[in-house]
């Protein structure tokens, strides 16, 4: 009797059949790669849109056209003959209040920067 010979050819073919090629692995991962790229693009677009919407200026500013701004109100007042002078300092308020015409001071201090003495000074102006 002859001893059975072991051939490495069938075993090599079996291992090759179980090991995916680069092309097969690429096909398997293609969906996840595309899904990841789409997710990154959607996230970047969302950030860009949110950033554009959130880049508004100061709340109730007469120069800010965004929804929280007051530019539309300032324009309506100007059409009614009211002089609107936006300022962001006490010096500017004093200068605007020195005009002989009747002056109305509208103060927005959402950061609570004005102390009681400054508010009294504004009231006297």
Image: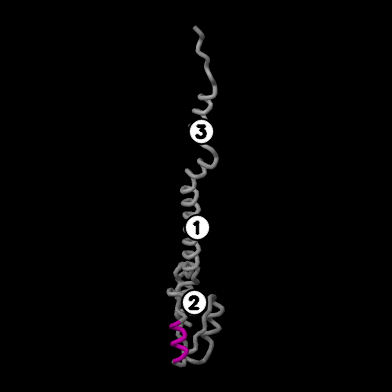
Marks 3 and 1, the one that precedes in the sequence? 3
Q: Residue at x 47, y 89 (%)?
A: 78
Q: Residues within 10 Å of mark 2 (few under 14, many from 20)?
A: some
Residue at 48% x, 80% y is 62
Q: Are marks 3 and 1 in contact (CB under 8 Å)?
A: no
On the image, numbered disc 3 is attached to which residue?
A: 19
Alpha-carbon span between mark 3 and mark 1: 33 Å
Above or below, comparing residue 102 to residue 12 in the picture: below
Residue drawn where x is 46% and y is 51% of the image: 35
Judge whether 76 appears above or below 60 on screen. below
Q: Nearer the viewer, residue 45 or 7?
A: 7
Work out whether residue 56 or residue 62 is closer to the camera in this orientation and state it: 56
Residue assigned mark 1:
41
User: Residue 112: which quarter of the image?
Assistant: bottom left
Residue drawn at x 56%, y 83% is 95
Question: Of label 3 and label 2, which has the lower sequence position?
Answer: 3
Marks 3 and 2, Cα distance to the nearest angstrom?
64 Å
- Residue 64 is situated, as x and y percent measured from the top left of the image, at 49, 76
Counting residues from the start of the chain, the first of labels 2 and 1 encountered is: 1
């Amino acid at each position: 009797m002859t001893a059975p010979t072991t051939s490495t050819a069938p075993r090599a073919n079996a291992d090759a059949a179980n090991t995916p090629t680069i092309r097969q692995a690429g096909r398997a991962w293609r969906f996840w790669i595309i899904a990841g790229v789409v997710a990154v693009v959607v996230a970047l677009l969302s950030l860009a849109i949110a950033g554009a919407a959130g880049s508004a200026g100061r709340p109730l500013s007469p120069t800010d056209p965004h929804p929280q701004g007051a530019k539309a109100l300032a324009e309506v007042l100007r059409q009614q003959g009211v002089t609107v002078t936006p300022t962001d300092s006490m010096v500017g308020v004093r200068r605007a209040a020195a005009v002989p015409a009747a002056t109305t001071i509208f103060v927005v201090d959402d950061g609570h920067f004005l102390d009681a003495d400054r508010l009294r000074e504004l009231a006297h102006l």
